[in-house]
Image (tube, rainbow, N blue to C red):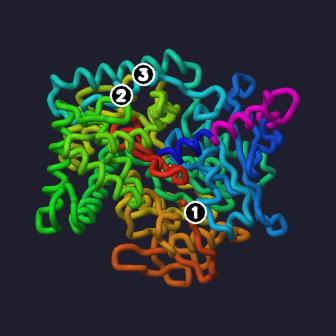
Amino acid sequence: MIGRRSWLAAAAILLAACSSGSTGPNEPPSTLPAYYSQHLDWQPCDNGFQCARLLVPFDYARPGGQRFSLPVIKLPAADPAHRIGPLVINPGGPGGSGVQYALAARSEFPPALLARFDIVGFDPRGVAGSQPALACLTGPELDTYLGTDEMTQNAAALAPIVTQARLYAQRCEQHSKALLPYVGTENTARDLDVLRAALGQSRLTYLGKSYGTYLGTWYAQLFPHRVRALVLDGAVDPETPALQFDITQAEGFQTALRSFATWCLAAAGCPLGERVSPGSVNNAAGRLQAMIVRANSVPLANRATGQVADGALLLNGVAAALYSKSTWPALKTGLANAFGGDGTVLVQLANLLLERNADGTYSNLVDADTAISCVDRPWPRSLAAWQAQAAAAGRAAPLFGPPNVWGNLPCAYWPVPPAPLPRITAAGAGPILVAGTTRDPATPYRWARALAADLSSGVLLGWNGDGHTAYGEGSACVDQIVNAYLPLTRAVTPSAPASGSSTTAGSWYRQENSNASELTSSTTAASVTSRQGTRSSVRRHSAPATPATRHTAYSGPGV
């Protein structure tokens, strides 16, 4: 935790440096051609990085109105003589900072890519260092909101959930009313194209994780002929209706929990049981759920912060640790302590997921996640519809289902209308690489399959593994394929498969095991290294576990 806070402090210093630079033309742009003619004024901002700011209009239909100023950061290619161009990256969320993600580039990407690509990150409109940025609840208000018990199926007990949801929507309108209609992903995709032009590129090379895949998908739909290479890792299915989206995601977390439980039960000292046996995984999940429910009535001790270690907060901690297999040992320790009455470790894990600072303040991740999610898809306005879906979610994913649905209830009271559910094919784009992990908690593998099938040139790369996203998460095969695909001159895959398929004849595909087919290249690539949702323990499209891994996706707190 100390290391991560130091890293965040460094990010804040760099954001300040970005803020001090010029944004291009002397006069702010007021027409689309003027926005597209911006030249980024790169300034050194520490440790080899360069910073600038990019202007984009609130409303692309009225470019002469208000504008956002977005921080952009770049790590120049290490080998300028063989430089290909910029690789723009997004960590997920919605609400994740691309600037912070890029700061970890040296540990996220292999030397071969760092040599040939500038790594470029930016904070999307309304997010993190964006000016202006979204703001809704205060730190104490978020503590209360995130600690609301959402496990109930009792209609009479819904009053606190509804009260908190209405308050959230009201506070967002009160503090960010001018921004709310304009923070949807379609607008951010248009910003991405302005950034492409400001970088001096005719086509975009992009890597999006988790929610970042939704951003990349929208870009390909709007600007298919400007796609050079797109890697969409931990895919979000744009055509899934909102509440079904929450249920499917909750099932992903339930699957990931079972995988963790199997691992835990196979070793000594597992707090969920003694050994793997028929029914032991179900018993382990039931034991954990019983502890979470009890903690909503009798909170556990918390020795680290003043937060109440109730079931809602503890569940966020469990969800946080499921994002990466590297944090399973911390989850094992946290559960052992929790069954002994001490919820401190799980609270710390939750705070990493939710980006809560030691002083009780939060980044604007939760606010941005909520505001963007509420305008990106239609949400029911009838409370009865939410009750029905929460009940269905409870049957499909008993521990994570109801909180994942109720965590998005502010969208039922949102003060601006949402966009319709999109139909995205990206017709005319070159091959787009869509990656998915079979036991991904936040973006279930079925979404990767659906997105690859929806895209007219989608190519599915599947990994039979654990944790959120695939690239840089332990599969040499996945890493090799991505590292070979990105530098291709035209980003065209030889012997490309039929649209949306994951296996085909030719050197670009192979069957790695009986459960997952993976795309592989006959070209030798260098070896490599690597949060959607609103509030409770199942909703981020990005991973909170380490400073170098920033991919959110949990419908409780984000993807």
Q: Quick one: label 2, few (<14), some, or many (20+) residues within 10 Å?
A: few
Q: Is residue 60 above or below residue 279?
A: above
Residue 531 makes an appearance in the image: no
In this image, 252 relative to 388: left or right? right
SS for callout 2 = loop
Q: Position of residue 47 (x, y in %)?
A: 73, 51
In this image, 232 relative to 314: left or right? right
Residue 130 numbered mark, or none: none
- Judged by depth in the image, the label closer to the viewer, 3 or 2, is 2
Q: Position of residue 8 (x, y in %)?
A: 58, 41
**In this figure, which residue is indicated by the disc labeled 3?**
169
Q: Position of residue 12 (x, y in %)?
A: 64, 37
| Sequence order check, earlier mark of 1 and 3 | 3
Q: Nearer the viewer, residue 91 or 331?
A: 331
In this image, 114 relative to 396: left or right? right
Q: Nearer the viewer, residue 197 or 513?
A: 513
Using the numbered discs, state the Cα–Cα distance from disc 1 to disc 3 in whole angstroms: 36 Å
Residue 432 numbered mark, or none: 1
User: Three-letter amino acid code at disc 1?
Assistant: Ile
The mark total stands at 3
Using the numbered discs, state the Cα–Cα distance from disc 3 to disc 2 in whole angstroms: 26 Å
| Sequence order check, earlier mark of 3 and 2 | 3
Q: Residue 82 colored magenta?
A: no
Q: Which region shows up in magenta?
A: 10-33
Residue 306 numbered mark, or none: 2
User: Three-letter amino acid code at disc 2?
Assistant: Gly
Q: Is residue 272 above or below residue 350?
A: below
SS for callout 3 = helix
- Judged by depth in the image, the label closer to the viewer, 1 or 2, is 2
Q: Quick one: label 3, few (<14), some, or many (20+) residues within 10 Å?
A: many
